[in-house]
Amino acid sequence: MLKFSSKDLAVFYQQLGTMIEAGVAIQNALGTLQKTSPRPMRPTLEQLTDGVNRGDRLYEAMSRHSNRFRPLDYQSLAIAEQSGGLDVGLFALASYHSRRAKARGKMIGASIFPMLIFVAAVFVASFPNLILGAMGMINYTTFDYLRDTVGLLGLLVFGLVACVMLCKGLFRVPALALPTDQLLRWIPVFGSLRFNYALTQWTQSIRLMLNAGYGIVEALEYSSRMAGSPLIADAYAKVRPHINSQLGVSELLAATGVFPPILTQMWGTGEQSGRMDEMLEKMVQYCEESWQRSLDRVAEWLPRIVYGVVTVFVAVQIFKLLGPLLAQYRDALQM
């Protein structure tokens, strides 16, 4: 089964957090949400309610439905429940999924029109060949037209899906995960989007764990593992043996060359001033703003890339069309 969408999760966490903040018992809140939450979630919420009524904590009940909820969600709620701030954790997840849904909507919105233009170009560019074939001027059938249009689009979709599946497969191989993440990071425009998104999750998780009373080692270890970036996990693995040395955490993180300098400088300021909570808020804000800027760049460049592909494709089709016509013209001149 597919995981719940970020849009549905944002609504669910916001509603549940509001009721918990108002003092409604978790069992009653979940019972109410079975009727008011997004419709795709209601059958699962019924099972969550049964689990909580049996004595499970919310995160324990959610972890039994890992095919619908993301690990980041129920593990973040585990920290929030243990610290006594379940409503705060729910609101944080609601905000996180709301931003994620908006980001996805922006990406889709930026790509719909260029994709429609590309699909139209594929069908229109081959249409003259179909007309000439019907007139008997060239050997071009309806099957050839479908092959050059529907077949081409199907091949492109298959190639895109294959690339995504290949990347996911590479991340599952320990020896290939880090080189793959390093390669993806340096892809122009798109690479920074993925890495900044991982940094956002990393800083948010550290802030949540430190506020819940966890130690810095536990917070870094857990957050680096859950950020979804082998680069960050590898950087922490290099730092971990030296955390208790005379060097500060900020100096150790800076030495890895993975984290942005301004991020490690903020961490160092928090260490020296004793205002780590305040600096963590600024670090989260900085990472979110960086991710948003990366998202805006992708939304800006995606149409340009598609328009460029359309231009090249149409140019190739024009030359392919003119080739036989020019040959017939030369033959006519020689007669």
Image (spheres, rainbow, N blue to C red):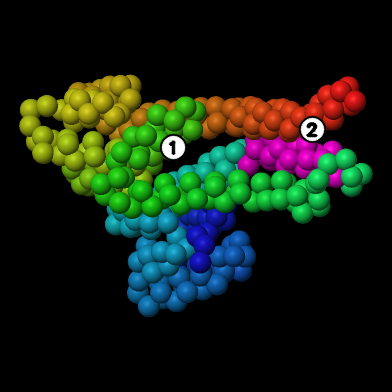
**In this image, 218 relative to 16: left or right?**
left
Location of residue 321 (image quadrant): top right
Crowding at dot 1, Cα within 10 Å, few <14 / some 14-19 / many 20+, comes out as some
Q: Is residue 250 above or below residue 126?
A: above
Location of residue 269 (image quadrant): top left
Q: Amino acid under label 2?
A: Pro
Residue nearest the viewer, comparing 130 with 303: 130
Question: For the residues marked 1 and 2, what is the alpha-carbon distance in whole angstroms?
Answer: 46 Å
**Does residue 302 appear anywhere in the picture?**
yes
Label 2: which residue? 324
Label 1: which residue? 194
Residue nearest the viewer, comparing 155 with 242: 155
Crowding at dot 2, Cα within 10 Å, few <14 / some 14-19 / many 20+, comes out as few
Residue visible at 70% across and 30% down?
Answer: 316
- Magenta stretch: give its range: 108-133
Q: Main secondary structure of the magenta part?
A: helix
Residue visible at 23% across and 45% down?
Answer: 221
Residue 234 colored in magenta in the image:
no
Say what secondary structure mark 1 lies in. Answer: helix
